[in-house]
Image (cartoon, rainbow, N blue to C red):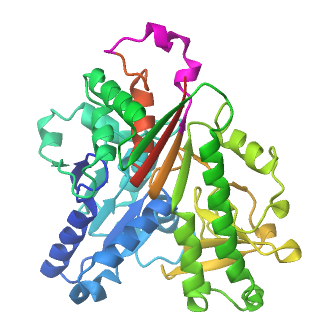
């Protein structure tokens, strides 16, 4: 078994381009290779597939159609004969590529390695600065702790140069792990004071209430989603039982909904507490858990919080509410058994573990990206030892330890063009 590690520093370093060129070169050499691609979450896997589909040279598209894309959990289930219709089992693969490795825990990678053939070549791709898996050890971080080991070092490919974003977002993300914290502190102070950046705004709040401009942005975002979703729900035939894929019927309207959905991502540190996901839901909807989704407007974002292999949904998949009263459904984008992208209506009675998703935790955002990201950061508020009158220039004013640096870095690097940071002081 041969393993290669591709390590990159944030988005825009050419990771996807490198994977595409690597696959094309491998297929040029051998047209009959079995290649599998994967990621820990459904949205990360979907993003990888969409990116490859958009950028692939047409002359090789017939070969890429034979490649299997699935989450790691679905690969494992299929390889254990759990009645999933995939092209290959793990033991049949010649090449296996895993993206977003920072999210993969040791138990998961062990299960995968035990099911792969001994002569399979494995390519692991990830950002070593992103968050580790919740409640489990990160195999990715462990590998780089021993990166000076000659056998590991010889397998590592580093992507250092940023091609997509060379502005303030990239600069902030690069300074978070700089040992000289004063550089990040100075940049944040400049952005907060002058507000001349075309990409980043930083706002300090002394109140626990949600910042007013963020609240108004949320309401505006929900109104836009309501308009685009109601335009689709007016087509009453879409609620008929025979409609399996709305992309075949109303592609323009469906694409508009998901374009609006992905236009603004609001991130919180935690599910509960000050400036949390649940706190925001209570402010905006006037509801606490358990939520009554039937009473919410069309277009409200929702998230599946548990894998559902029967419906083809993964933990963290985002959709919207559609239809009123008895016609209320969940609208999700997913992949069918033939690995084709579809958009389907799901009856609420068939899917439990669904919550509002006007905001999500930073952990849940891994594998996502958005044109605009708003971060609600309250870590500093909870740390008396980081009071303003005690702060030193050599202390990171946003993050007290490596975990908080990873948390903040992961949130910042979700933004493609615009980033708003709100913090309690």
Residue sitting nearer the eye, 207 or 268: 207
Residue sitting nearer the eye, 16 or 93: 16
Q: Residue furthest top?
A: 390
Let me know if residue 381 is in the magenta part.
yes
Quadrant occupied by the N terminus: bottom left
How far across and down, in percent of the image, does residue 106 sit? 42, 42
Q: Residue furthest right?
A: 326
How far across and down, in percent of the image, does residue 421 sit? 48, 39
Let me know if residue 101 is in the magenta part.
no
Task: Answer with left or right where residue 418 lies relative to residue 315.
Answer: left
- Name the image quarter holding residue 171: top left
Residue drawn 36% across the image and 42% down it: 196
- Name the image quarter holding residue 25: bottom left
Residue drawn 72% across the image and 87% down it: 238
Q: Which residues are magenta?
A: 376-394
- Name the image quarter holding residue 122: bottom left
Residue 308's place in the image compared with 412, above or below, is: below
Residue 138's place in the image compared with 221, above or below, is: above
Residue sitting nearer the eye, 87 or 100: 100
Task: Answer with left or right where residue 339 lies relative to residue 61.
Answer: right
Q: Is residue 137 visible?
A: no
Q: Is residue 264 visible?
A: yes
How far across and down, in percent of the image, does residue 84 sit? 55, 73
Residue drawn 77% across the image and 88% down it: 236
How far across and down, in percent of the image, does residue 189 sit? 37, 27
Quadrant occupied by the C terminus: top right
């Amino acid at each position: 078994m041969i393993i290669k590690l591709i390590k990159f520093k944030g988005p825009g370093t050419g990771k996807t381009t490198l994977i595409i060129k690597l696959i094309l070169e491998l297929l040029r050499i051998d047209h009959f290779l079995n290649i599998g691609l994967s990621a820990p979450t459904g949205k990360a896997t979907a993003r990888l597939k969409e990116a490859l589909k958009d950028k692939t040279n047409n002359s090789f598209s017939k070969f890429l159609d034979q490649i299997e894309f699935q989450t790691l959990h679905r690969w494992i289930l299929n390889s254990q004969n759990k009645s999933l219709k995939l092209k290959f089992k793990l033991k049949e693969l010649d090449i296996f590529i895993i993206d977003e490795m920072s999210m993969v825990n040791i138990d998961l990678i062990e299960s995968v390695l035990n099911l792969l053939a001994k002569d399979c070549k494995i390519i692991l791709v990830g950002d070593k600065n992103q968050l580790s898996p919740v409640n489990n050890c990160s195999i990715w971080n462990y590998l780089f702790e021993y990166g000076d080991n000659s056998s590991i070092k010889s397998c590592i490919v580093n992507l250092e140069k940023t091609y997509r974003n060379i502005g303030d977002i990239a600069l902030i993300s690069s300074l978070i792990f700089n040992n000289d914290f004063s550089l990040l502190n100075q940049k944040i102070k400049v952005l907060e004071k002058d507000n001349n950046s075309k990409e980043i705004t930083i706002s300090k709040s002394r109140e626990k209430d949600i910042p007013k401009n963020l609240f108004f942005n949320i309401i505006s975002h929900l109104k836009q989603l309501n308009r685009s979703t109601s335009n689709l729900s007016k087509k009453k035939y879409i609620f008929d039982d025979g409609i399996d894929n709305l992309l075949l019927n109303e592609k323009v309207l469906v694409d508009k909904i998901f374009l609006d959905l992905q236009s603004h991502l609001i991130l919180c540190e935690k599910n509960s507490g000050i400036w949390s996901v649940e706190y925001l839901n209570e402010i905006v909807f006037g509801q606490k858990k358990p939520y009554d989704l039937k009473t919410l407007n069309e277009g409200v974002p929702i998230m599946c919080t548990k894998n559902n292999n029967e419906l083809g949904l993964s933990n963290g998949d985002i959709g919207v509410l559609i239809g009123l009263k008895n016609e209320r459904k969940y609208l999700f984008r997913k992949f069918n058994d033939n690995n084709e992208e579809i958009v389907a209506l799901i009856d609420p009675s068939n899917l439990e573990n669904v919550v509002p998703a006007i905001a999500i935790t930073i952990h849940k955002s891994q594998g996502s990206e958005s044109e605009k990201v708003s971060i609600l950061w309250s870590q500093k508020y909870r740390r008396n030892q980081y009071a303003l009158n005690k702060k030193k220039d050599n202390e990171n004013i946003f993050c007290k330890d490596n975990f908080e640096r990873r948390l903040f870095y992961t949130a910042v690097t979700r933004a493609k063009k615009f980033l708003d940071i709100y913090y309690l002081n």
